[in-house]
Image (spheres, grey):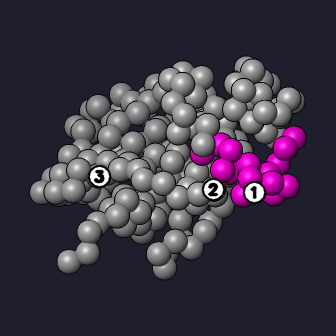
């Protein structure tokens, strides 16, 4: 039997159920930039009550750790920053579920999702500008060089395909101008 992968374990079930989501983080950065190792996938998920109720059935307890439904409700109810994990216990692979809640950046990005074929199934991929913005935020918060490498690889790979105006507007709105300059070597 083949080793499980992040998309098969976590993304394809969401896709088949019609749950509104987008792949972000390192997996998206790799698809837009260059490959590297990761053991988790970041998913921005739009959770309403019926969707929350379906998560435990989508990821059965004999294979996955899923937090209690009440915890998912609390996280989905936060104005910003709601988050929980789903873990595939046999492999240790993990999905970080980021609740879209009322975060304006999530809502901006979901209207610009890119549908891309990956492993014979379409995947909702966060727009590269969103991935870059989140990587800049994570770098500002934690200083990890992996975010710098991801952003630089995406900039090199995508070049003029990026919506530079939207990127500039969100960088200013999120107060990331200094981080942008430090990471990209470019000024706004």
Give the residue at x 41% y 42%.
Answer: 97
Q: Secondary structure at mark 1?
A: helix
* Quarter of the image with the N terminus in it: bottom left
Q: Is residue 11 visible?
A: yes
> Which comes sooner in the sequence, label 1 or label 2?
2
Q: Tell which tag, 3 or 1, sits nearer the viewer.
A: 1
Q: Name above or below for residue 78 compared with residue 5.
A: above
Residue 65 picture location, percent across and down: 20, 46
Quick check: 98 above or below 180? below
Q: Is residue 43 magenta?
A: no
In magenta segment, residue 160: yes
- Residue receiving disc 3: 93
Give percent across and percent down for residue 143: 54, 25
| Residues rendered magenta in the picture | 150-165
Seen at 46% across and 46% down, the residue is 42
Q: Is residue 6 left or right of residue 117?
A: left
Task: Tell me how far mark 3 sits from mark 2, CA to CA.
Answer: 22 Å
Residue 178 picture location, percent across and down:
75, 21
> Whole-Å distance between the Cαs marked 1 and 2?
8 Å
Q: Nearer the viewer, residue 90 or 143?
A: 143
The kind of secondary structure element at disc 3 is loop
Asked if the residue at tag 2 contacts the one at tag 1, i.e. Cβ–Cβ closer than 8 Å, the answer is yes
Observer-nearest residue: 118 or 153?
153
Query: What secondary structure is the magenta-colored segment mainly?
Result: helix
User: In front: mark 3 or mark 2?
Assistant: 2
Question: Can you identify the residue that label 1 sits on?
Answer: 158
Q: Residue at x 37, y 59 (%)?
A: 6
Judge from the rendering whether residue 90 lies leftward or rightward of residue 6; answer left or right.
Answer: left
Density class for disc 1 (Cα within 10 Å; few <14, some 14-19, many ≥20) is: few
Q: Which mark is residue 33?
A: 2
């Amino acid at each position: 039997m083949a080793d499980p992968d992040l998309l098969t374990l976590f993304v394809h079930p969401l896709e088949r159920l019609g749950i509104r989501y987008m792949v972000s983080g390192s997996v998206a950065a790799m698809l837009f930039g260059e490959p590297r190792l990761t053991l988790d996938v970041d998913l921005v998920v739009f959770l309403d009550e019926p969707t929350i109720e379906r998560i435990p059935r989508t990821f059965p307890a004999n294979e996955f750790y899923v937090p209690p439904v009440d915890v998912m409700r609390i996280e989905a109810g936060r104005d910003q920053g709601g988050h929980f994990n789903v873990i595939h216990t046999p492999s240790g692979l993990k999905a970080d579920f980021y609740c879209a809640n009322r975060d304006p950046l999530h809502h901006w990005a979901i209207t610009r999702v890119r549908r891309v074929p990956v492993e014979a199934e379409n995947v909702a991929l966060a727009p590269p500008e969103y991935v870059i913005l989140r990587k800049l935020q994570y770098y500002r918060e934690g200083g990890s060089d992996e975010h710098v490498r991801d952003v630089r690889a995406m900039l090199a790979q995508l070049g003029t395909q990026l919506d530079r105006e939207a990127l500039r507007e969100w960088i200013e709105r999120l107060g990331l101008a200094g981080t942008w300059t430090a990471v990209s070597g470019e000024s706004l």
